[in-house]
Amino acid sequence: MFELLFAAAASLLGGFVDAIVGGGGLVLLPALFAAYPAAAPATLAGTNKGAAVWGTAWAAQQYARRVSMNWGTLLPAATLAFGGSLAGAWLLTQIDGSGLRKALPFVLGAILLYTLAKKDLGRAHAPLHAPQREALLGGSIGAVIGLYDGFFGPGTGSFLVFAFVRLLGYDFLHASAAAKLLNVATNVAALALFGWKGHVWWHIAAVLALANIAGSLLGTRLALKHGAGFVRGVFIVVVGALIAKTAWDAQLL
């Protein structure tokens, strides 16, 4: 029972962080490994997805009600993100991803430095492209980061937010809303694969999902209330934490 309560508390915090800017897996997945050290890693990853997908879907729905969403860009992007995530999960069974693990802290570090250097980045919502070109770029973002999520995963939400800010000219609030929709697609794809392989503890995932939704509700309300500047600040904190976590995992620290 203690293990479940500990994991539920982590799921609530993960849902809160993920709703604002992504990175909830940074909280929940390590907590699952700590609570259930004897479990197969694939089962813990699948259970994590079984919880997180609900909080992310709730956040996406809340953002869609309050933030203008360019569905002409986002629906094709989400579809390609779904396909990319499935392809990435399959690719994981074919090749070793250890090189990516070592490179990830440096990629995240470059994103953090760029965001800090560009103090006005993502503060104003000013899309850069005509609808057709934005849809093409959005689809490319979905496919590439979806592939990454299925293959490896850490920082997916943050990568999506940064891509929509830097490449499409979204502010951090609109980028976070867009990222939630694409992250739902990648999570559903991964959950389908894990579930098909029998790697989800559905009874535990159901409890964690309720906690994740509660955290997501609070995080979404704060993001909508305080706007792009608040989301940008949380983004910087989360990416910094991701750098430390991924560097530790890659034995660089």
Image: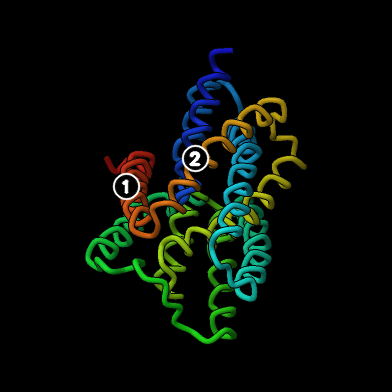
Kindly give the residue lying farthest to the right in the view shown.
196
The 10 Å Cα crowd at callout 2, few under 14, some 14 to 19, many 20 or more, is: some
Relative height, residue 70 to residue 132 (above, below): above
What label does residue 64 carry, if any?
A: none
Distance between the alpha carbons at the discs numbered 1 and 2: 18 Å
Tell me which amino acid carries mark 1. Answer: Val
| SS for dot 1 | helix
Residue at 68% in and 30% down:
206
Please tell me which residue lies in front, 245 or 160: 160
Residue at 55% in and 22% down:
36
Please tell me which residue lies in front, 117 or 143: 117
Residue 41 on image: x %, y %: 58, 33
| SS for dot 2 | helix
Tell me which amino acid carries mark 2. Answer: Leu
What label does residue 237 carry, if any?
A: 1
Image check: 247 left or right of 181? Answer: left
Residue 203 on image: x %, y %: 71, 26
Residue at 64% in and 71% down:
71
Closer to the N terminus: mark 1 or mark 2? 2
Residue 150 can be seen in this image: no
What label does residue 218 carry, if any?
A: 2
Where, quadrant-wise, is the N terminus in this rendering?
A: top right
Image check: 175 left or right of 239? Answer: right
Residue at 32% in and 68% down:
121
Residue 175 on image: x %, y %: 47, 63
Residue 250 on image: x %, y %: 37, 43
Relative height, residue 16 to residue 235 (above, below): above
Kindly give the residue lying farthest to the left in the view shown.
117
